Amino acid sequence: MSDRELVVLGTASQAPTRHRNHNGYLLRWDGEGLLFDPGEGTQRQMLLAGVSPTQITRLCLTHFHGDHCLGVPGIVQRLALDRLAHPVFAHFPASGGEYFEHLRHASYFYDVLDLREEPVTADGVIARGEFGTLEARRLDHSIDAVGYRLIEPAARHFLPDRLAQAGVTGPMVGRLQADGQVWADGRWVGLADVSAVRRGQRFAFVMDTRLCDGVYELADGADLLVIEATFLDRDRALAADYGHLTARQAARVAAECGVRRLVLTHFSQRYPDLAEHRAEAQAAFDGDVVVAEDLMRVPVPPRSVGVRTA
């Protein structure tokens, strides 16, 4: 099992279908579990997907339409029932604070959960940790909405062929990493001589929105982009009216932003067959296209073999 993967819990938009639950996406990222936009039934979908609610460390809501948040009461009460030992951080548009308060306390329960609310008040970094940085950007929907991006820190990567050429072997490698230079074969070898900076992995989550600057900022260089494709391009006028994207628009974003793996989701119930969504996306984006299905697991693509600069 990958240590970095997206577990798709639901893929429907406003109304669920017989085969698609309301939204819900769990990003497993090393020791973190980020639950995005839990709609109704998310708790049961986690059971069917074989993931435990106790993996959740962060709750990230893009906005307060019901298909993106009505699963919050069940998740919060379940975590309290399980007496979760670690805190859970909740991120959501600050203007919806009253809604979050209602969702958090929707009914009586023995509330022992350490739930720490961190409303999003502006674009930028909203959390830092061993995972890297979590950022938010404003989107263009019918109500206040934000998208999220997780960025792993860049890391220096040793190049084995250059280490060998420089005569740096065994414990010398550790000393080089600690001190920045080491004496080898009669000369000083610096860290930059035998290594390169490899950019960290990036994950982006974009839900209900029209095309806007925030969409492109979030998707920029993403290894895995999860993005709504509520409509087909033939219905792009409806998409614009209701504040959504088409499959073609989502794919063009991926192409322009250098995305490696594109995950389309949040489908309108008007489309029982999603073959056209895939065709539209593949016509605009020549990378890896995933048309999300409930309970699917999508690995974050492995780091590129080649070394990239920051």
Image (tube, helix red, strand yellow):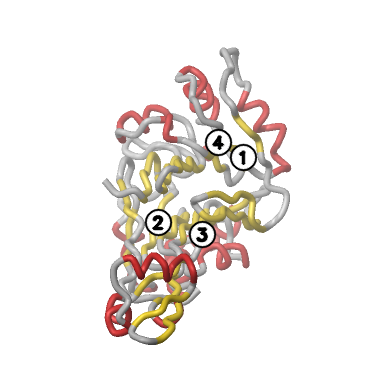
Q: Residue at x 47, y 44 (%)?
A: 13
Towards the viewer: 203 or 237: 203
Q: Which residue lies at the image location 41% right of the left edge and 48% below the top edge?
A: 29
Residue 264's tag is: 2
In the rendered structure, are the residues bearing label 1 and label 3 in contact, judged by CB atoms less than 8 Å apart? Answer: no
Residue at 66% in and 40% down? 118
What kind of residue is marked 3? Ile
Q: CA distance from mark 1 to mark 3?
A: 25 Å
Residue 306: % across, % down: 33, 76
Could you say whether the residue bearing mark 1 is in a helix, strand or loop?
loop
- Does 242 sit above or below residue 78? below
Of callouts 4 and 2, the N-terminal one: 4
User: SS at mark 3?
Assistant: strand
Q: Which residue is mark 3?
A: 151
Labels 3, 4: front one: 3
Q: Percent position (x, y) of residue 126?
A: 64, 50
Looking at the image, tell me whether mark 3 or mark 2 is earlier in sequence order.
3
Task: Check disc 1 and report the residue beneath it.
Answer: 64
Looking at the rendered structure, the kind of residue marked 1 is Phe
Residues at marks 4 and 1, CA–CA distance in whole angstroms: 6 Å
Number of other residues with Cα within 10 Å of mark 1, as a class: few under 14, some 14 to 19, many 20 or more: many
Per the rendering, the mark at residue 69 is 4
